[in-house]
Amino acid sequence: MKFYYSKYQLLLTVFLSIIIMQNHAFAQQTYQPTWPSLEKHNEVPDWMRDAKFGIYCHWGVYAVPAYNNEHYIQHMHNDNPDYSKLGTYKRHLALYGPLEKFDYHDFIPMFKGERFNADEWADLFVKGGARFAGPVAEHHDGFAMWDSDLTPFNAKDMGPKRDVVGELEKSIRQRGMKFFTSLHHELNYTNVKMKPGWAGSDPKYAKLYGSTMKKEAWDQMWMDKCNELIDKYHPDVIYHDAWLEQVPEKNLQTYLAHYFNEAEKRKQDVIVTYKGEDIPAGVGMEDHENSNPKNIIDKPWLCDYSIGTGLSYSWGYTEGMEIRQAKEIVHTLIEVVSKNGQMLLNLSPKADGTFPDDQKDVVYKVGRWMWSFGEAIYDTRPFGVFGETTAANQKVYYTKKGKTIYAIFLDWPGDNVAVNLKKLTSQSIAGKVRSVNLLGLKNLVQCQNTLSANGLTITVPAKTRVPSDIAYVFKIETE
């Protein structure tokens, strides 16, 4: 009896010591693991509001089967006859055999990334006009794309045998961009169906499939992975997919306090993103996936937007995937920025680490517009109204920079026509218009204009060769 009592005392002492040590460590730092303390952090620093546009990539083991979407690991394990994506399970059986013989982890050796080149990726991001960029660090399949000491299922030890996150972090920073990464692993616990003979039921694969781990151990690994990314790569932005309510609040708060405190030591202004009500609004930047609000939102926000579209609507590469064109992407970016948002474009590399030619072509076209007309996007802030539709049914969006207003037409308004912008009145501008110029012309052409209480009327010049016909920017300088 005495032995058990002593053992209990020892365990209690160790437990209390750990708590005291943790509290002491945070007591010496600015941010404590509580919401009131974390809300003191500047959730959206000016560098993000100036950057406006970023690019990230969904690249992982799911690029090997390249079917349906990046949630292949969940779809392939769902044999419910009523499941809407039952075709993935049936197709897997036909191509690879029963799951008892070929499960998701068997794709890992096929995920070689033999043509992955971090410098080429970073160059593509720059050409596309991105100011921040990076990879998905871990998606819903449990495979870490960095050199992790916490799980054997990582890209350094398996598959490509490369520290993908680390290599990209270096290449991206070398080109003057901020480093972004995303984590989606909060949903991975018990996210794969368990069945006798399937790998999800085998403890050997617990850190990949998650189904056999105890919840406490899984929650600890979730937090440890977040902290490992912070300590190894110092990301400027950590994006979280939804479902943070799956994580114990204390683990979430402890991780965020660590992130903010470590960044403060490096004099780094960092951002964490969230969806819905996953964390309090004063702690991070809210993300609106593939959507735009109806009006200007006071707090700066993020729109992540995938190049993939169509019925499968995949964020990861799939064979024959449909993609958005440059015009749709730039038009969405313009609207996002006019409403106080920032845009994050997702690309979908193939399993070998290269980007399909059609995706690269879209990025080049987006970049041509951004490098030609980016002054209407970068470093801007919303005008009093986000935009309007003209009498000729032309959509126009507004941004501003100091005393300069940018009117961005999604389509050419017509040669030698007078366009009245009703929202730009002598009251809303609160000053005189000094000049109106159409950006992108070889020679500066001033447009005739008249400002009144009924709006600003601009006489549009004849259309000549411009760097891009995706959208047209009129620069309005006021006094």
Image (tube, rainbow, N blue to C red):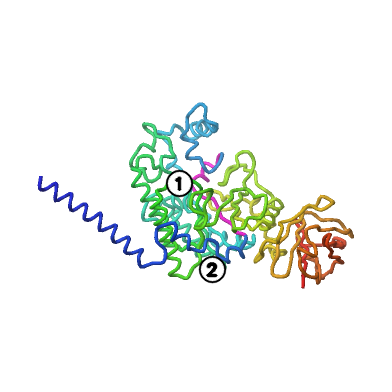
**Which of the labelled discs sits on residue 214, or is there none?**
none
How many numbered circles are shown?
Answer: 2
| Residue at figure coordinates x 45%, y 60% from the top left | 38
Whether residue 152 sits left or right of residue 55 in the image: it is left
Q: Quadrant of the N terminus?
A: top left
Q: Quadrant of residue 467?
A: bottom right
**Nearer to the camera, 85 or 121:** 85
- Residue 58 within the segment the image draws in magenta: yes
**Nearer to the camera, 216 or 157:** 216
Using a 10 Å C-alpha cutoff, classify the residue at mark 2 as few (fewer than 14 neighbours), some (14 to 19) or many (20 or more). Answer: few
For mark 1, give the secondary structure: helix
Please provide percent x and percent y for residue 210: 39, 43
**Nearer to the camera, 308 or 14:** 14
Disc 1 target residue: 245
**Which of the labelled discs sits on residue 174, or is there none?**
2
Q: Which residues are magenta?
A: 53-67
Please provide percent x and percent y for residue 16: 25, 56
Residue 114 seen = no
For mark 2, give the secondary structure: helix
Q: Quadrant of residue 98?
A: top left
Residue 29 seen = yes
Please provide percent x and percent y for residue 188: 44, 44
| Residue at figure coordinates x 46%, y 32% from the top left | 97
What's the residue type where badge 2 is placed?
Answer: Gln
Mark found first going from the N terminus, 1 or 2: 2
Using a 10 Å C-alpha cutoff, classify the residue at mark 1 as few (fewer than 14 neighbours), some (14 to 19) or many (20 or more). Answer: few
- Residue 402 within the segment the image draws in magenta: no
